[in-house]
Image (cartoon, coloured by chain):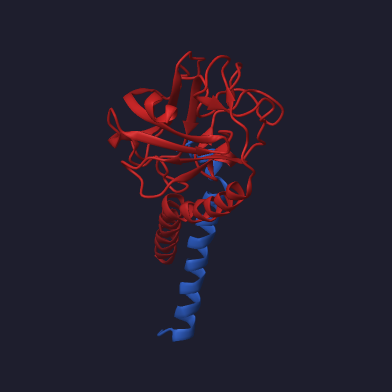
Amino acid sequence: MQWVRVLGKLLISMGVGVFLFIVWTLYGTGIYTQQQQQQLAEEFDRLPALERQTEKGQSFPAGPPPGYDPAPGAPIFRMHLPTIEDKPMMVVEGVGTDELKLGPGHYPSCRPGFERPLCTSYEESYPGERGRVIVSGHRTTYGMPFWSLDKMEKGDPIHFETQWGEYTYLVTGKEVVPANSDAIVVPSDKYEVVLTTCNPRYSAAERLIVYAELDMEAAAR
Amino acid sequence: MKRSWKSKVLELLLWAMVAVATAVVLVMLSEEILPANF
């Protein structure tokens, strides 16, 4: 039964191949993201400071100046979740497959370079601006930026460093929604941030959503 | 018939190549077979 032995060895080899693929998916992709994050951080640190743009009659908070239009994959701000992450991470513009390989992505408005459904029909918001800043990230691959997002609790801070200032948001709540839900992609009158990732770990069956609002006292200082 | 150690090593290398090839094919197909934002 020579062919049975060959078939057995073939199946074992392919099984080893599947195992290697799983290891690459869970850990190898993280090496790529780590290298990209380092480059993005260096690139971000070389960017010039931008003048804050406040709403009429207010001195704070403040967003980027008019015409701020980052390209897909460009580093746009540094985000730190001290409750669950030791180090801050660079957030890039866009939530397409290629952008999310670099790190968490900021949901953009639909414009050249960003196509539906991965963009908003209304104007995007950035940290410090009125509106909903949406940041999406991987849970189990590409550096697992939101691996422990479920551990965030009400009151936990989220720090942002942008070209136009630094902002702290405080978590107000979290929820789990079906994977096909686009309920979070809506305009808002609040100064808020929404973080979103896959749920549970190793699955894309649902989305975990964390809501946070700008710490106005910290922004005023 | 007893096989030489060279023959055994060659066979091992062959199966290792099959394993690596399987992994490479899966990596190339990963964007199709893995859900987005997994």
Residue at position x 57%, y 35% from top? A164
In-front residue for pair B33/A205: A205
Residue at position x 69%, y 25% from top? A111
- Describe residue A79's horizontal placement relative to residue B21 as left or right: left
Give how far across and how far down residue A30 sits, in percent.
Answer: 46, 52
Residue A216, compared with residue A15, is above or below; it is: above
- Describe residue A191's horizontal placement relative to residue A114 as left or right: left
For the N terminus of chain A, the quadrant is bottom left
Q: What colour is chain B?
A: blue
In-front residue for pair A177/A5: A177
Residue at position x 64%, y 43% from top? A48
Residue A208 appears in the picture as rendered: no
Q: Residue furthest right?
A: A112
Give how far across and how far down residue A219 sits, in percent.
Answer: 43, 29
For the C terminus of chain A, the quadrant is top left
Q: What colour is chain A?
A: red
Residue A196: which quarter of the image?
Answer: top left
